[in-house]
Amino acid sequence: MRYLRRTAALCAAAALTVGAVACSDDDSTADTTTTALAPAPGVPGFGAPVEIARDLNVPWGLAFLPDGTALVAERDSGRVLRVAEGRAPEPVYTVPEVAARGEGGLLGLAVSPDHARDGYVYAYLTTDRDNRIVRFRLDGPPQPVFEGIAKASNHNGGRIAFGPDGLLYVGTGDAARTASSQDPASPNGKILRLTPDGAPAPGNPTPGSPVYSLGHRNVQGLAWDASGALFAAEFGQNRLDEVNRVTAGVNYGWPEVEGGGGSDRGFTDPLLTWPTAQASPSGIAIAGDTLYVAALRGERLWSAPRSGDGFGAPTALLDGAYGRLRTVAVAPDGSL
């Protein structure tokens, strides 16, 4: 059983879904018992989680429309559902050409920052040929935005989000070809930065290239803090999962480095790491001065308070309460 939970708060929101871990596609049944979410540093007044929707088919992407309702991507069915409290999930679109195999399928969603004018929703999906990004209006066919990201049964990445600059950021995976992460000509194992039309963004480290940062293994979390700094969650291999502060042009070391210890070789070390059994981090969000990380294999929501330019030691919330957590997101109305 797959479901969404909402947790009331004064200034933040975290919508949680259950999904698949990066290297183990086990969508096990989730516990639906409601438990209280303890107050977290920087976000006062958390109440008890409330179930919003259940019986979803492997929910993955999550994005909010201007009216406050959420769009949820079902990885295996290719459907996009509109989800809101007090009404049944409503199928509003089916993305064509979705090839749901292994960890591939309909993955991340993002709503255009100019949605009130253009009506666009963006989706990252796996097809029979590649991983790609399309955009669509709920009443029209999809348009290709960016194609040619290599696909595999795992390490497809898939998180997309518009940044404070109005540009589209894309987390990709190495598609089980580790050398791609260090290849500046490959879009795999990277964070890409694109215009809304899919062109390489002006000001990228290499003119004409979509690559914003490199040396990543499998990026599935993107979030910005109040200052506009970008943070990303990344799956490790056997030892350590990561959260990185992402800077344009920086190399984060994969496959030469897993976790820290690469700074003496010109790589940038992560801000936070966990043993892979405790995390497998997918979606991340920043609310107030707190970072939240949804853990699949770890079956918990990690919470880390602001510390200087990064975040301090994380603590576990919802530990084992709802099974594997795929996504955490900040809602536009400040509620969960």
Image (tube, rainbow, N blue to C red):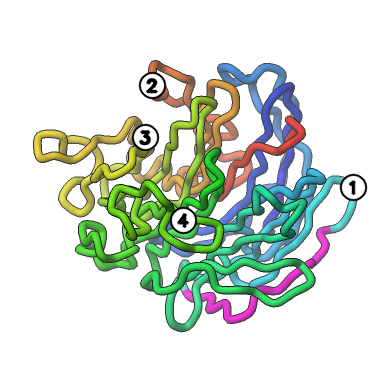
Position in image of residue 106 (x %, y %): 58, 68
**Separation of marks 1 and 3 at Cα, in angstroms:** 38 Å
The dot on residue 336 is: none
Q: Nearer the viewer, residue 117 or 49?
A: 117
Position in image of residue 218 (x %, y %): 37, 55
Q: Quadrant of the C terminus?
A: top right
Question: The magenta stretch spans which residues?
Answer: 89-101
**Separation of marks 1 and 2 at Cα, in angstroms:** 40 Å
Query: Residue tagged by mark 4?
Result: 194
Does the image show residue 318? yes
Does the image show residue 324? no
The dot on residue 309 is: 2
Between disc 4 and disc 1, the foreground one is: 4
Mark 2 vs 4, N-terminal side = 4
**Separation of marks 4 and 3 at Cα, in angstroms:** 19 Å
Query: Residue tagged by mark 3?
Result: 245
Q: Residues within 10 Å of mark 4 (few under 14, many from 20)?
A: many
